[in-house]
Image (cartoon, rainbow, N blue to C red):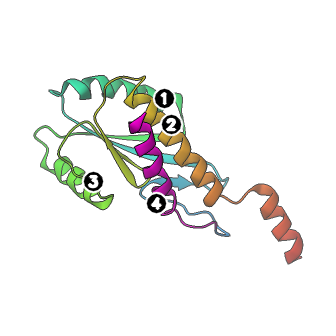
């Protein structure tokens, strides 16, 4: 329960970093993409090693998650013997105020989660955080069709 409360608080802070709605939806940020039709795709950055038992549990979960949700783009980085991926992990973790000192690491929507116990524990928290982020992007970035149509009516 404490983990979910921490995640919720972190998510609320991250939503504040999203840009306000604009007349033209943004094409691409580090965390999401909105196409001309207003469809949202979130980016999930997953950092892992093949020798980590928690990573071996998390890997099929996040792969299935990206298959279940076509709006989720999974960027998977094996850190073993790959300095570029390690540098990417450290850099991205710092960017969101985290530390890249454990795996698996999940970075998305301006915040970071680490560790994985099960699909019912951290998996559920990760899924809910991603769904909440997508909803926040929809609410704060994508103009509803009715609002756009009303704006055009006044422009005429």
Q: Nearer the viewer, mark 4 or mark 2?
A: 2
Quarter occupied by the N terminus: top left
* Residue beneath disc 4: 29
Left/right of residue 61 with respect to residue 20 in the rendered view:
left
If you read the primary sequence from the N terminus, does the residue marked by circle 2 or circle 3 appear first?
Answer: 3
Secondary-structure class at tag 2: helix
**Range shown magenta:** 1-21
Q: Nearer the viewer, mark 3 or mark 1?
A: 3
Residue occupied by mark 1: 67
Q: Going by the image, does 40 lie left or right of 50?
A: right
Give neighbour class at mark 3: few <14, some 14-19, many 20+ (Cα, 10 Å): some
- Which residue is identified by label 2? 128
First in sequence: mark 2 or mark 1?
1
Q: Residue 75 sits in which quadrant?
A: top left
Quarter holding the C terminus?
Answer: bottom right
Of all residues shown, which one is farthest toward the left? 81
Q: Residue at x 25, y 59 (%)?
A: 94
Whether residue 62 is visible to the viewer of this picture, yes or no, is no
Question: How far is mark 2 from mark 1, CA to CA?
Answer: 16 Å
Q: Residues within 10 Å of mark 1 (few under 14, many from 20)?
A: few
Task: Tell me the number on the disc at residue 98.
Answer: 3
Helix, strand or loop at label 1? It is helix
């Amino acid at each position: 329960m404490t983990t979910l409360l921490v995640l919720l608080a972190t998510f609320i802070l991250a939503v504040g970093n999203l840009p306000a709605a604009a007349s033209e939806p943004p094409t691409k940020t580090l965390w999401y993409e909105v196409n001309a039709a207003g469809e949202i795709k979130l980016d999930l950055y997953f950092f892992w090693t093949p020798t980590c038992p928690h990573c071996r549990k998390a890997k099929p979960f996040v792969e299935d998650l990206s298959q279940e949700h076509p709006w989720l783009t999974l960027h998977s980085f094996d850190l073993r013997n790959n300095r570029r991926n390690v540098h990417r992990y450290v850099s991205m973790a710092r960017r969101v105020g985290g530390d890249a000192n454990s795996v698996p690491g999940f970075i998305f929507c301006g915040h970071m989660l680490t560790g994985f116990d099960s699909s019912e524990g951290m998996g559920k928290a990760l899924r809910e955080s991603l769904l909440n982020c997508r909803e926040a992007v929809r609410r704060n970035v994508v103009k509803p069709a009715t609002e756009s149509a009303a704006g055009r009516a006044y422009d005429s």
